[in-house]
């Protein structure tokens, strides 16, 4: 393929989202929509990825170059803003709000659009609402016209072939054609779709690839599909999921073969889960959790930025944050890694085969050596050496004959009395 530049149209106001966050930065399975697009197009090895952004945005960390569209005059105007940065022969233009776009669909567009001045991806949607409708020239796979829904007649609205919002252009063609686009429509905007007559229609293989996000509801629907794709891929690598529908795994997560993930589990981005682990139910593995082989993380355990060694068990009700935990460590129920002092986060280290008693608080920075023990219920603020036991709690005292001094009622007797009454006994 000859050289190609990519332009991502990302300057729209996103007003239908009804919130303040810039639309391309809304996350889908842990990644901003803009990052999803970049990942799909980067596989092409494009010459340059250029984002068109609004005056208040800065997307420079995602792409090679950015240009500003000062006033939101429409998608054609947005593309025009990028022209000074374009020097490749071909151009892929893509809306920033379609995070499910895949490399396969883009390859299809480029291959089938070969030899045309312009080509676009389309899909036949059961529910085409909100999309521009594509009207072909007779039976041919060429565009006669694209009508936006708000400009469509009742008959045009019934059409199910929709414009995906991703286009392939010869650069010299679109630079000329864009000059013929007017604002003669219901929104008085420059529609890029008005430069598409004559373009080759390329039907996408998987209709889900082209779904766009204009509203919060669409963001949730698209996120659900993204998560299903992630889960399917993880299961294809030999991971067991008891209930994929309640297993929420972000993009950029790896899970090793033979691991079992139980319901209600959340695994966030940049985590690497080893082989033969048992995770969940109801575990929350936050960013940068890295586990070895045969690690057990049970119910109501939260981890974050934590390296956890082979054969270590963290069974119940525990927080492990900013930690390095060795191999074959047992962490008792209700243990808290106290990592935050109100300003900074601190590290905790736990050595191999250490035994952390239930309801321990490990106040970071602190180090529990290998084969060291903390007594249940301890608040550990000092390092514990190898083979030592750290105990930090008050010694128990028992006060005899205390029962009689309590001001409580004798519930047992009261209960017996009521019960007897109900049975009709004296
Ligand atoms: C657009 C298409 C529609 C298609 C749909 C697919 C047009 C006119 N219509 O509609 O045919 O079916 O996408 O999802 O293109 N943008 C700018 N500057 C602007 C206006 C928009 O950068 O002045 C960007 C937006 O950030 C967005 C993209 O262009 O990424 C499309 O704009 P949007 O308002 O979402 O268009 P749709 O109504 O969804
Ligand atoms: Ca859109």
Image: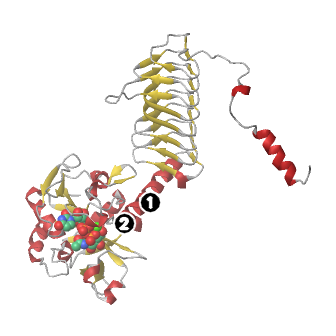
Vertical relation: 308 (above or below) 409: above
Q: Answer with the quarter of the image where residue 6 lies.
A: bottom left
* Residue at the image position 76 percent from the left and 37 percent from the top: 410
* Residue at the image position 90 percent from the left and 54 percent from the top: 424
| Front residue (pair 356, 237) | 356
| Front residue (pair 366, 101) | 366
Circles 1 and 2 in contact, beta carbons < 8 Å: yes
Mark 2, residues whose alpha carbon is within 10 Å: few (<14), some, or many (≥20)? many
Measured as percent of width and height from the top left, residue 358 is found at 58, 26
Say whether disc 1 or disc 2 marks the residue closer to the N-terminus: 2
| Whether residue 243 can be seen here | yes
Q: Answer with the quarter of the image where residue 55 lies.
A: bottom left
Extreme residue in the right direction: 426
Ligand 1 closer than 8 Å to label 2 CB: no
Identify the residue under disc 2. Answer: 211
| Whether residue 143 can be seen here | no
Identify the residue under disc 1. Answer: 225
Q: Secondary structure at mark 1?
A: helix
Measured as percent of width and height from the top left, residue 324 is found at 44, 25
Left or right: residue 413 compared with residue 396 = right
- Kindly report the distance in space between the C-alpha atoms of the residues bearing marks 1 and 2: 10 Å
Vertical relation: 345 (above or below) 399: below
């Amino acid at each position: 393929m000859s050289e190609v530049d990519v332009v991502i149209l990302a300057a729209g106001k996103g007003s239908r989202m009804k919130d303040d966050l810039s639309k391309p930065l809304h996350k889908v399975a842990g990644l901003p929509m803009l990052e999803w697009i970049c990942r799909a197009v980067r596989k092409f090895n494009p010459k340059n990825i250029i984002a068109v952004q609004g005056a208040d945005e800065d997307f420079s960390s995602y792409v090679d170059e950015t240009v500003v569209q000062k006033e939101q005059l429409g998608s054609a105007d947005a593309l025009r803003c990028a022209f000074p940065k374009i020097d490749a022969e071909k151009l892929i233009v893509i809306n920033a709000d379609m995070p499910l776009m895949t490399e396969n669909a883009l390859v299809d567009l480029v291959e089938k659009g070969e030899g045309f001045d312009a080509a676009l991806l389309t899909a036949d949607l059961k529910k085409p609402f909100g999309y521009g409708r594509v009207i072909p020239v007779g039976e041919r796979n060429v565009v006669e016209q694209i009508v936006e829904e708000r400009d469509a007649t009742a008959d045009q609205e019934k059409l199910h072939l929709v414009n995906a919002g991703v286009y392939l252009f010869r650069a010299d063609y679109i630079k000329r054609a864009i000059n013929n686009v007017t604002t003669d429509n219901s929104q008085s905007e420059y529609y890029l779709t008005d430069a598409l007559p004559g373009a080759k229609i390329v039907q996408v293989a998987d209709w889900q690839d082209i779904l766009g996000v204009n509203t919060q509801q669409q963001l949730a629907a698209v996120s659900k599909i993204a998560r299903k794709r992630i889960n399917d891929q993880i299961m294809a690598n030999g991971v067991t999921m008891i209930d994929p529908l309640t297993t929420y795994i972000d993009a950029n997560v790896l899970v090793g073969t033979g691991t079992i993930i139980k319901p209600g589990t959340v695994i966030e981005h940049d985590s690497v889960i080893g082989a033969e682990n048992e995770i969940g139910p109801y575990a929350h593995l936050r960013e940068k959790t890295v586990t070895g082989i045969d690690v057990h993380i049970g119910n109501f355990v939260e981890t974050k930025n934590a390296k956890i060694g082979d054969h270590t068990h963290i069974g119940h009700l525990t927080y492990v944050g900013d930690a390095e935990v060795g191999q074959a460590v047992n962490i008792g129920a209700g243990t808290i890694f106290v990592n935050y002092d109100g300003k900074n986060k601190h590290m905790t280290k736990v050595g191999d085969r250490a035994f952390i008693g239930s309801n321990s608080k490990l106040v970071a920075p602190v180090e529990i050596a290998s084969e060291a023990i903390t007594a249940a219920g301890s608040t550990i603020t000092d390092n514990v050496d190898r083979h030592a036991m750290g105990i930090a709690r008050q010694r128990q005292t028992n006060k005899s004959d205390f029962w009689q001094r309590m001001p409580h009622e004798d519930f047992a007797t009261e209960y017996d009395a009521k019960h007897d009454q109900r049975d009709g006994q004296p």
